[in-house]
Amino acid sequence: MEVDSEPSTQCNASRIFEGYKALGLIAGDKPFIVRYIDKFEDVRIVIIVGNYFHTYNSKLQLIETSHPHPGPVNALASDSKSVFSCSENKIYAWSGGRRNLYQVFEGHESRIHSLLAFGPHLISVDDSNVFRVWEISTAETVLEVPFGEGFTITCLLHPSTYINKILLGSKQGSLQLRNIRTQKLIHTFKGWNSKVTAIEQAPAVDVVGIGLEDGVIVVHNLKYDETLMTFIQDWGPVLNISFRTDGPPHMVTSSDKGHVAIWDLEKRKLFVQKRDIHQAKVTGCQYIFGEALLLTSSPDNSLKMWCFDDPEEIGRTLHCREGHTHPSTFIRFYGSEGQNILSVSSDSTFRMFSVYSERLHRSLGKASFNRKYAKKVGVANDPNVMPPIVDFAAESIREDDWDNVIARHAGLARVTTWTTKKMRMGSHKLLHERFKNTKDIVCTALAISSCGNFVILGYNTGHIDRFNIQSGIFRASYAKINEKAHEGSVSGIVCDETCRLLVSGGKDGIINFWVFKTCELLTELKVDIPINRFMLHKESSILAVAFDDHTIQVIDLDTRKCIRKLPDHKTPITDMTISYDARWLIVSTEDCSIRVWDISLIKLIDWFLMPSPCKSLTMSPTGDYLAIALENDLGIFLYFNLSLYLPVSLKPISDSHIPRLNKLPSVRKEEPEGKEDDDKDQDEADEVVNVEENETVDIDMLDLDYKSPEQISSNLITLSSLPTSRWKNLLNLDLIKQRNKPVEPVEKPKSAPFFLPTIDGLEPDFDLTQTETDDQDKKEKSKVLNNLLGVSPFGKLLLNCAQRNNFSPVIKQLKEMSPNTIDSEIRALDAMTLKDEDIESDDHTLLASFLMAMESALETRKDYELIQSLLGLFLKIYSPIILKDHNLVKQCENLCELVKKLPNSLQDQFNESLFIINFIRGTV
């Protein structure tokens, strides 16, 4: 289960794109492990990310994202059925896996920083140092104790087997054991003159682990107030403590330097230290109960699970989920199938995210001036990290042979190469010799040829150079005069699909068209406006050019002329992309807006807002997804294209349209059938309120439950929409029955009577003559019934409809019949005549009524293919009879004329189109 959209207080503002999921959004703070007793006792790992909960399973697969909180989540607590979270001075109780909010605790006057679920009670502590005990069922305060400045609570713990007792750690270093039922202080522990940062229950009764701010770890016995052992961590404050419960007596502690230490309590010494497992402080470090698994998390947007199979081993990475430590700055879909997204961030890392599975996410590494030295000392300790990547270009055609990605860095003239085959930084750093001793040179534009052999680089000096990507050797320069292609900085470079044309644009307001191979200038297009960026759709040779005055022009590379002009977007354009079929141009601006333009009509068909400005966006080559990278979010948000799956109206929006905030995608867990969601009614109410608030919203365009009418127009032919098996085989039904006939006839076993008749004699025997006489009686009775057979119910319906001159009930019943039933009913219309064709009869009322029903159905132009099949079967059966009856012949002639008129206009149009296509094809 990967995807679905979360319910939100905002209804989805986009008419074309629906939220799918977030890529690379892993962890934001300390992990919180929950074991659900009522759900197979499966482990759930909850991560606090801003004002959301992200829930993972034991394999670190994201399974659910919670409802958004009114504010950031400060702390979590849980029991076997509910999860409690606090935001500012309120506590929220969630049931069913953080899906349904059923209780809100109010009473604190300041921000809450600690929570503890304690049987039927919930304990909370706020920044004002107020200790409060709540009754969970009623949300009422049971106990409130305001602590003074002499004891500032920092953490809470309920020691195992200590009934109604809570251990409190303080900023002053002392500890208190209190009974919340009798409201008495039982004992005060003097402490170690340092702030208590963590308290954890040990597997042994009466023993707890205490972490201090000065790096000291104390294993203390509460019953005798005795310190059993002491350890010192040299990396600063102890952020977390956890004990292993499945085997060796190990204790793990974490620090704010990204290191973890594992202590052997039996030998009272350090067992192993794991350095730089995260690039920031280790805020979460916890053993999973009963398993040899250690979970660590960090604000560096990573979540890792370590496995300790062998007690002598130092542990190995079992699962890892990580993303950028800073928001993505530039993203593009990679490959022709749209399965992966390449992304860069201001942390100088290059990553590839898979659209379909989190397990396929990969890291290409961090950009470094000396990659070998960085590999030797570790990425976290590399002093030669390059500036962030601001732009890149990739081609997949030669990825198996050599480097296939190029990237330019902020403020640098050198361009680095990367390989998606080996998932690492390449060996080349491209720079022309003329710039090696020159300062203030910056690469401002780049492109990679469609063949995957060449790299084209543009600089702020106006130079454009071409390099071979395999060897890194300089090949040629594109220049007009003074060895420069433009008078100012180069803003954009693109190469067409066939590598015959190169297009460049600069701040001088000129677009140059070059012969790619000879570097000859073909023509130039003057626009007199500084160019901001290029976006090329190679399959259609359409180039979108964004200018500094916030306008966009669409240029055809074949004619080298401007074919479309888009109006002013009011704010700077941050990025743009073209849909796979070159119908839409999607533009993002700094005012948090995303606009979708219809290129052919130059009309705005969609306009919505995001929570923060969009830094980059890209649409998949198959048109399935739109990926968006926001300025203040770590993840890449993926939206799927509604127009591929639902009938979406794409008429232009009105000039008075007011864009509204679009909700971010997240993951929702599937509900069992029949289970009602308590939030459904509230979400629907919110959507209604939001629509009413914005009166300019076009309700017709938001209505996706479109149902096609029974008949669009009375001038058009409408099919019956029945399965082909219901009408296609009517004429060949006899042949089908003959083929399906068994080789040997199936004999029905003779049923024995309840009391079997016997024949008297020395040896008793059964009397079988009675069963034979019974069979003969049944055959005679069936013959009598056949002779007395009258008009069938279908025939009666046909006669009644003929009297009322309304045959719609007849057609309706024929559509509900099976092919066998239709065949038998049509054959029964004139059964007596069929038995003896020599009998001359002028009364064929049922046959005439059936032909009248067919004529009436043809006049309505509905159920065209069904009527044709019924007529074919009717004529096949009754042709001899029709030829002997003058009235029936006349009816058939009228039907023939009516049938000929119906498809004539359509057939003429088909023929005309075929003639034109054949003429054009022959001429070319």
Image (spheres, helix red, strand yellow):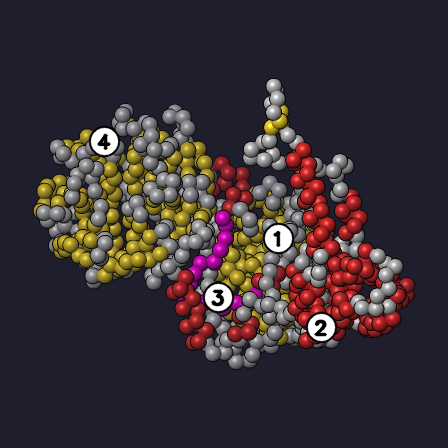
Q: Which residue matches tag 3?
A: 12
Q: Which residue matches tag 2?
A: 802
Q: Which mark is residue 204?
A: 4
What's the amino acid at mark 3? Answer: Asn
What's the amino acid at mark 1? Answer: Gly
Q: How far is disc 3 from disc 4 in space, using C-alphas?
A: 53 Å
Structural crowding at the residue carrying mark 2, measured as other residues with C-alpha within 10 Å and reported as few (<14), some (14–19) or many (≥20): some
Q: How far is disc 4 from disc 1 in space, using C-alphas?
A: 54 Å
For the residues bearing labels 2 and 3, Cβ distance under 8 angstroms: no
Looking at the rendered image, the quarter that the C terminus falls into is bottom right
**Magenta stretch, residue numbers:** 1-16
Q: Secondary structure at mark 2?
A: helix
Front residue of 80/859: it is 859
**x%, y% of residue 845?**
77, 69
Q: Secondary structure at mark 4?
A: loop
Q: How far is disc 2 from disc 1 in space, using C-alphas?
A: 61 Å
Which label lies toward us, 3 or 1?
Answer: 3
| Residue 454 falls inside the magenta stretch | no
At x 41% / y 28%, what residue is drawn? Answer: 309
Which label lies toward us, 3 or 4?
Answer: 3
Front residue of 548/286: it is 286
- Establish if 210 lies above or below 138: above
What's the amino acid at mark 2? Answer: Ala
**x%, y% of residue 431?**
63, 52
Residue 420 sits in which quadrant? top right
Q: Is residue 608 visible?
A: yes
At x 36% / y 51%, what residue is drawn? Answer: 96
Query: In the displayed structure, does residue 574 sit left or right of residue 267?
Result: right
Whichever of labels 3 and 4 marks the residue nearer the N terminus, that label is 3
Residue 148 sits in which quadrant? bottom left
**x%, y% of residue 479?**
72, 62
